[in-house]
Amino acid sequence: MNAMMSAVATPSKVVSQVMQAAVFRAYGEPEVLVVEERARPVPAAGEVLVRVHAALASIGDHHVITGKPYAIRLTPYGGLPGPKNVVPGQCFSGVVEALGAKVNTVKVGEAVFGQKSHGAFAEYVVIRAELVVEKPKNASFEEAAALPWGATALDGFRVAGLKPGQRVLVNGASGAVGTWAVQVAKAKGAHVTAVCSARNQALVRSLGADEVLDYAVEDFVKGGARFDVVFDLVGNRTNAECKSVLLPKGTWIPCFGGGNDWVGPMGRIIGAFISFMFSGKKVGQFVTSPNRENFVQLKELVEAGKAKPVIERVYSLGEVVQALTHVGEGHVRGQQVVRIAG
Ligand SMILES: NC(=O)c1ccc[n+]([C@@H]2O[C@H](COP(=O)([O-])OP(=O)(O)OC[C@H]3O[C@@H](n4cnc5c(N)ncnc54)[C@H](OP(=O)(O)O)[C@@H]3O)[C@@H](O)[C@H]2O)c1
């Protein structure tokens, strides 16, 4: 019998061993993705199998699929000469379907969300049990899939040592990370100035921003205001300009793409470390990786009503190319989610 078409009998039901997944076998624009049938993964010891309900299409997935900056090909997210893990997709939500050996932190049937380096654009994903957390009770599966991306805001403000009452500027406040950054900063008691375009002003204000600047008409560098933390998700100002808007001992968090095809913005960020030296001001560089403590904090923020994912559009698995193309265009309004089941 064709192994891909077989089925196994369990005591309770007959379970198909195949699943639909978005697959890429060469780096390129999102059109390299095709939806096809694949073998369903099996959880090893310490892992769980999750029936995926929704997956986030993020700029991180776009980097993985394009293989740019090229440095990503040297990480577990990429591979050489082509992608090592052909099913992309990092953040997801779903229902635990089966447990590998030695798993006692989650139960079959539990609704969860989580993040790994690949595999979420599929009907099933396996993941280490500690990297899934119970879905917030007040979040849909689509919203829960978007939660792990908020960890970038938690990490950024942790690196900056943000304290209540401090003044924060979020440049790029309407994007996938920006919408989280505004809400996390407010939840931490900061005063938030948000920079976005006119079409997104009402959205960003509804997330709690105290002041909202339209980047087409107001220049935060020339405005005269000074900040304890500048969370920069755009990277459209020079290092010297960013340093100039910080209060003494302030922190600039460079969290943007651009730069060259090899290492992205890293050259510029290294330059910033040098130019900030002896200024008393800091460059807060970090890379977010899947982390249970962050997921728990995000769940608590959502359940407490202090933050909520902003979903621009929900796509089907067959529309995953459109979702990632939109993400790659740089004008997302919150987050893009792919509904896979349910
Ligand atoms: N270090 C890490 O671990 C980490 C983790 C995650 C993400 N990142 C990085 O974080 C960056 C932000 O990602 P993202 O997912 O939020 O999406 P994004 O695509 O960078 O954000 C797009 C948003 O930026 C706005 N924007 C564009 N030009 C602007 C300008 N001149 N001034 C102010 N806002 C502007 C757009 O609004 P309009 O459409 O209205 O222009 C849109 O809402 C990315 O570069 C990503 O690589 C880093």
Image (cartoon, rainbow, N blue to C red):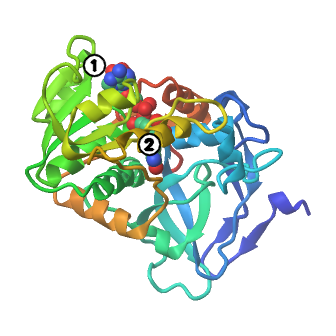
Q: Report ligand 1 position as a quadrant.
A: top left
Q: Residues within 10 Å of mark 1 (few under 14, many from 20)?
A: some
The image shows residue 226 at horizontal and vertical percentages of 15, 34
- Name the outermost residue toward the front: 278
Disc 1 C-beta below 8 A from ligand 1: yes
Q: Residues within 10 Å of mark 2 (few under 14, many from 20)?
A: few
Quarter of the view holding residue 123: bottom right
Name the residue: 62% across, 39% down: 263
The residue type indicated by label 2 comes to Ile
The image shows residue 196 at horizontal and vertical percentages of 27, 24
- Label annotation for residue 274: 2
Q: Which of the marked residues, 2 or 1, is nearer the chain's N terminus?
A: 1
- Name the outermost residue toward the right: 1
Q: Of 124 and 341, which appears nearest the observer?
A: 124
Q: Secondary structure at mark 1?
A: loop
| Whether residue 149 is visible | yes
Q: Is residue 201 left or right of residue 299?
A: left
- Label annotation for residue 197: 1
How far apart, in angstroms, are the residues tagged by discs 2 and 1?
A: 32 Å
Name the residue: 89% across, 59% down: 2
Q: Of 297 and 278, which appears nearest the observer?
A: 278
The image shows residue 139 at horizontal and vertical percentages of 29, 54
The residue type indicated by label 1 comes to Ser
